[in-house]
């Protein structure tokens, strides 16, 4: 693309770095911003930069949070004996939207993927083990995608967790999850949590 302005070119280049945004879309978005009021654009850029600078991760479950401990972990209405293990914050949002789960979460921050050089040490695995050492946890539910990475991660976690006297279960496999969250229907996801099965039974 030939740009008539270096400022325009730089802005388009930044937008084009976002996932799913090509040069043409980036240009359309940038031109759209140019048509907005300056105050509106300032609000937009403030929100992005505040998000990046001020966001925290919950000390307990590692979910994205405005506070040191997220609202879910801090709530007395939640069942803290039940921990649902998920890949990232999108999964927490999807499960919360089902209104079928009243436990707490543990956000791994990814999945084990030897191909991408991601090992257990890159994920929040040790902190999960630490949480189980505290009394009171009765069940861990794996809600990870039915992919090679999801399966590898569950297999590894199960080995680490079976030393504890807790139930280990998994949601129904094969439903769209993880990166395909926008396609998950809430009823199916909600049902798969309610009808979760012991992990050992899920192996066939
Ligand atoms: Zn939390």
Image (cartoon, rainbow, N blue to C red):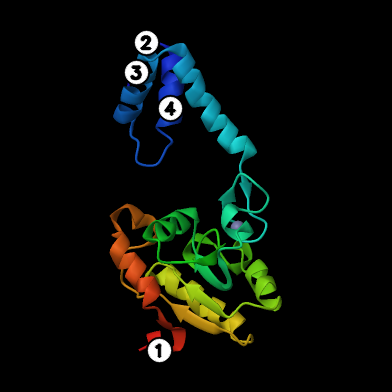
Q: Earlier in the sequence, mark 3 or mark 1?
A: 3
Q: CA distance from mark 3 to mark 2?
A: 13 Å
Q: Earlier in the sequence, mark 1 or mark 2?
A: 2
Mark drawn on residue 31: 3
Left/right of residue 127 with respect to residue 98 in the rendered view: right
From the top left corner, tell me how far across and down residue 115 is, in percent. Answer: 47, 64
In the figure, 115 relative to 16: above or below? below
**Residue 171 found in image quarter:** bottom left
From the top left corner, tell me how far across and down residue 157 is, in percent. Answer: 55, 76
Name the residue tied to disc 2.
4
Name the residue tied to disc 1.
201
Q: Earlier in the sequence, mark 1 or mark 4?
A: 4
Q: Residue at x 46, y 21 (%)?
A: 10
Q: CA distance from mark 1 to mark 4?
A: 50 Å
Q: CA distance from mark 4 to mark 2?
A: 14 Å
Q: Earlier in the sequence, mark 3 or mark 4?
A: 4
From the top left corner, tell me how far across and down residue 160 is, in percent. Answer: 61, 80
Mark drawn on residue 61: none
Left/right of residue 178 with respect to residue 124 in the rendered view: left
- For the residue pair 77 and 30, the one nearer the viewer reads as 77
């Amino acid at each position: 693309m030939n740009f008539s302005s270096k400022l325009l070119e730089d802005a388009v280049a930044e937008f084009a770095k976002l996932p799913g945004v090509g040069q043409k879309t980036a240009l359309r978005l940038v031109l759209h911003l140019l048509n907005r009021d300056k105050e509106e654009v300032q609000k937009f850029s403030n929100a992005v930069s505040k998000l990046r600078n001020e966001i925290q991760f919950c000390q307990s479950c590692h979910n994205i949070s405005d506070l040191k401990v997220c609202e879910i972990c801090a709530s007395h209405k939640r069942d803290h004996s039940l921990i649902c293990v998920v890949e990232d914050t999108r999964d927490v949002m999807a499960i919360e939207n089902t209104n079928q789960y009243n436990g707490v979460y543990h956000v791994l921050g990814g999945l084990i993927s030897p191909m991408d050089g991601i090992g257990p040490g890159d994920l929040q695995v040790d902190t999960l083990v630490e949480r189980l050492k505290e009394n009171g946890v009765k069940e861990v539910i794996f809600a990870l995608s039915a992919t090679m990475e999801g399966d590898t991660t569950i297999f590894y976690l199960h080995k680490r967790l079976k030393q504890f006297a807790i139930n280990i279960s998994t949601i129904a496999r094969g439903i769209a999850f993880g990166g395909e969250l926008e396609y998950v229907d809430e009823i199916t996801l909600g049902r798969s949590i309610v009808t979760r099965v012991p992990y050992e039974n899920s192996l066939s």
